[in-house]
Amino acid sequence: MSALRILRHLLTPPWVLNRAFPSRVLAAIEAAVKGSEARHRGEIRFAVEAGLDLGDLRQGLSTRERAVEVFSRLRVWDTAENTGVLVYVQWVDRRVEIVADRGIAARVGQTEWNGICRAMEAAFRARQYEQGAVDAVAAVGALLAKHFPARHNNPNELSDRPVLLR
């Protein structure tokens, strides 16, 4: 547990996300998710969180562990074919994690997801938040289309709207 990490999380107000993710960027991400899901049977959720609370920080909660919690909280697992995918951004730590449900994890390895995460982190370092997020959604969608192509009946089981966790 780093004292600097704790301070950064506790002193970062949730509204900082509005700078990188104003409504225009959220709408672009939502459109990217909607467009992607037309080509596959997966369900993509996109969530951004500013900082963690003191309890999580004292426990040393990693970005990956928090992503798994958010995956559950947003019920990304609740799809008919177990094809939910969460793209989780931990803003203060500047980390991205992708958590895939078991139906997808059986076909797509974590190494492929990690490549998408690192590319998105690089875009964010260059302050290309919209492009980095949209490109990540497209890359996730390409993997889903390869393994779970759309069928004639392709219901939208989860919201396409990005979530800003506060």
Image (cartoon, rainbow, N blue to C red):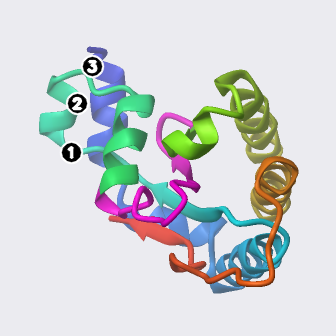
| Disc sitting over residue 107 in the figure | none
Give the amino acid at mark 1.
Asp
Identify the residue position indicated by label 3 in the image: 3
Q: Is residue 57 above or below residue 12?
A: above
Identify the main secondary structure in magenta: loop
In percent of the image, x 63 and y 85: which residue is there? 23
Q: Is residue 31 magenta?
A: no
Element on which disc 2 rests = helix
Which of 149/30 is in front? Answer: 149
Regarding residue 100, the answer to whether it shows in the image is: no
| Disc sitting over residue 53 in the figure | 1
Which of 54/7 is in front? Answer: 54
| Disc sitting over residue 57 in the figure | 2
Magenta range is 73-95
User: In which quadrant is the C terminus drawn?
Assistant: bottom left
- The CA distance from mark 2 to mark 1 is 6 Å
Which of 34/1 is in front? Answer: 34
Question: Looking at the image, do the residues carrying marks 2 and 1 touch, with CB atoms under 8 Å apart?
Answer: yes
